[in-house]
């Protein structure tokens, strides 16, 4: 006896054939069609235990059909497939009530698993975001890694689950946090962000929870904290690994009991805030070092979400650079096109600053170059690191280290007796460090916190080196 009846709708006959065979082998009864009208007729007649449908069909878009299906048969799970693999496709699928969204091409084993889960535990997703609110595209990329992010974000938007976003600097952690808020059920509340690394440690508790008049020297009046400002909305705790232990204890109390007290206050204040945290550090290592509370980690890490670095999704670079060039054009900068060879150069670059570095490059290209078409030569002149000749060639790090070794070998060979002048170590170290630190500061527009993260240095170490090497730090508004 069949395990269930599946209705399949896709205008591609090859996909219908593949789905028919795979689902039939799994024990399901399958009916398939190439148009939305037939699918709607079957659904309205009460047929099928589940629907699998493509978004774009010749007679009607599935996103227009989905609300009618959910109104008529709210418990009928619908899986949406689409070759338009964008974040907004996943969002639309979720807000229209789809059980699951699958980007094409999809894995048949995953599809069979989804079908089994849907038929055993049918779900409903409440509608939340109207199509008129979806003009902007907050996340860009069609890679498999980003598709997983889209699907996870779409599932999380209608929940209040605490999310921990991890990823290198510049991967877009705050952008994902904003998407969770802007397209979720708390979108009418405030999105409030606080960066733990950017606030003096002795002020973080006051910034988070507010303080009473006279609570400490300089507290001349009562001040509201970020928790109070975010009431009913979302509080984004960026660089959570830099939070001091005292503030961690207070935050744990909020997560456990749903209330907090201001600095200097005694009356508990109820809190209705969704917490989204982010880090570019390994919090488990910080726990081992005694710098982060393990119980707080488990409270924050309810749903872990890792953002891949740009080098792991290089196929997204063309979409991203076009997106940023279009964005800066809307801001008033000249229109730019980018030739194919230039795109290949960009895809082979390792992007240590990730998406943020690519966005900054797009702004420079639009602002500084008069030609309408950006060539490969322009890209070569802009990128700070040498590019490998092919995808199979030596890595950037190998090329760089080899060049340093060859230059030093030639330097030592220049002395007849093989003995360079004294003090060589510090002299060469300065010659290497100065341009390296200067380049990192330029890439981060003078932001020493981000430059330290990029270099893998402690911020105090970076500040000392800046002083010792007399490096001019110029902050840019671009």
Image (cartoon, rainbow, N blue to C red):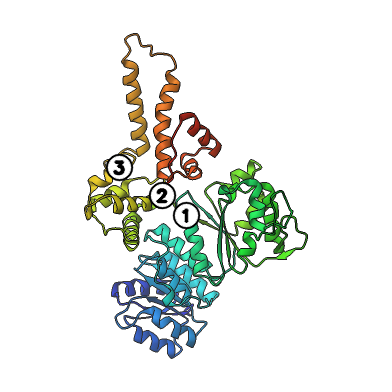
Residue 392 badge: 3
Element on which disc 1 rests:
loop
Who comes first in sequence, dot 2 or dot 3? 2
Q: Position of residue 122 (x, y in %)?
A: 53, 77
Q: Quadrant of residue 327?
A: bottom left
Question: In the rendering, at what x and y percent does residue 412 appear?
Answer: 35, 17
Q: Which mark is residue 307?
A: 1
Mark 2, Cα crowd under 10 Å, few <14 / some 14-19 / many 20+, is some
Q: Residue at x 67, y 56 (%)?
A: 251
Q: Are marks 1 and 3 in contact (CB under 8 Å)?
A: no
Residue drawn at x 52%, y 48% as measured from the top left: 280
From mark 1 to mark 3, how far is it between C-alphas?
25 Å
Asked if residue 39 is positioned above or below residue 200 in the image, the reply reads below
Looking at the picture, tell me which residue is in the foreground, 320 or 24.
320
Mark 2 → mark 1, Cα distance in angstroms: 11 Å
Packing grade of label 3 (10 A; few <14, some 14-19, many >=20) is few
SS under mark 2: helix
Task: Specify whether 333 is left or right of 372.
Answer: right
Q: Is residue 390 left or right of residue 254?
A: left
Say which label, 1 or 3, has the lower sequence index.
Answer: 1
- Quarter occupied by residue 435: top left
Which secondary structure lies at badge 3? loop
Q: Is residue 393 in view?
A: yes
Give residue 354's mark.
2
Q: How many marks?
A: 3
Image position of 26 (left or right of 407): right
Q: Position of residue 195 (x, y in %)?
A: 56, 52
Q: Quadrant of residue 79?
A: bottom left
């Amino acid at each position: 006896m069949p395990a269930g009846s599946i209705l399949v709708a896709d205008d591609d006959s090859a996909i219908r054939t593949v789905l028919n065979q795979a689902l039939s082998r799994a024990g399901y009864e399958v009916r398939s069609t190439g148009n939305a009208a037939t699918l709607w007729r079957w659904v309205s007649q009460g047929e099928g235990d589940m629907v699998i449908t493509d978004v774009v069909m010749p007679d009607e878009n599935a996103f227009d059909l989905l609300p009618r299906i959910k109104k008529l048969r709210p418990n009928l799970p619908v899986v949406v497939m689409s070759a338009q693999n964008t974040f907004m496709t996943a969002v639309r699928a979720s807000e229209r009530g789809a059980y699951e969204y699958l980007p094409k091409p999809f894995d048949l084993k995953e599809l069979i698993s989804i079908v089994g889960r849907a038929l055993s535990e049918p779900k409903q997703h409440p509608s939340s975001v109207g199509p008129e609110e979806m003009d902007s595209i907050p996340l860009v990329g069609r890679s498999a890694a980003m598709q997983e992010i889209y699907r996870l974000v779409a599932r999380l938007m209608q929940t209040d689950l605490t999310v921990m976003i991890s990823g290198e600097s510049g991967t877009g952690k705050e952008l994902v946090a904003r998407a969770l808020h802007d397209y979720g059920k708390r979108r009418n509340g405030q999105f409030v962000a606080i960066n733990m690394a950017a606030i003096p440690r002795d002020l973080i508790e006051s910034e988070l929870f507010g303080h009473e008049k006279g609570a400490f020297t300089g507290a001349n009046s009562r001040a509201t904290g970020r928790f109070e400002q975010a009431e009913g909305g979302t509080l984004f705790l960026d660089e959570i690994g830099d939070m001091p232990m005292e503030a961690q204890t207070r935050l744990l109390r909020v997560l456990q009991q749903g209330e907090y007290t201001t600095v200097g206050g005694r009356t508990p204040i109820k809190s209705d805030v969704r917490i989204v945290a982010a880090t570019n550090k390994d919090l488990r290592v910080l726990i081992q070092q005694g710098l982060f509370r393990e119980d707080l980690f488990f409270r924050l890490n309810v749903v872990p979400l890792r953002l891949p670095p740009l080098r792991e999704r290089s196929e997204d670079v063309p979409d991203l650079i076009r997106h940023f060039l279009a964005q800066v054009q809307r801001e008033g900068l000249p229109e730019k096109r980018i030739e194919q060879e230039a795109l290949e150069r960009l895809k082979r670059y390792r992007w240590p600053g990730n998406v943020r570095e690519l966005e900054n490059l797009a702004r420079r290209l639009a602002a500084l170059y008069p030609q309408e078409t950006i060539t490969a030569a322009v890209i070569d002149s802009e990128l700070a690191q040498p590019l490998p000749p092919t995808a199979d060639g030596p890595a950037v790090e190998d090329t760089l280290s080899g060049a340093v070794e060859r230059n030093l070998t030639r330097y030592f060979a220049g002395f007849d007796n093989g003995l360079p002048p004294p003090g060589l170590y510090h002299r060469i170290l300065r010659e290497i460090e100065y341009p390296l630190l200067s380049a990192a500061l330029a890439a981060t527009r003078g932001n020493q916190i981000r430059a330290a993260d990029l270099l893998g240095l402690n911020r105090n170490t970076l500040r000392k080196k800046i002083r010792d090497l007399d490096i001019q730090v110029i902050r840019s508004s671009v």
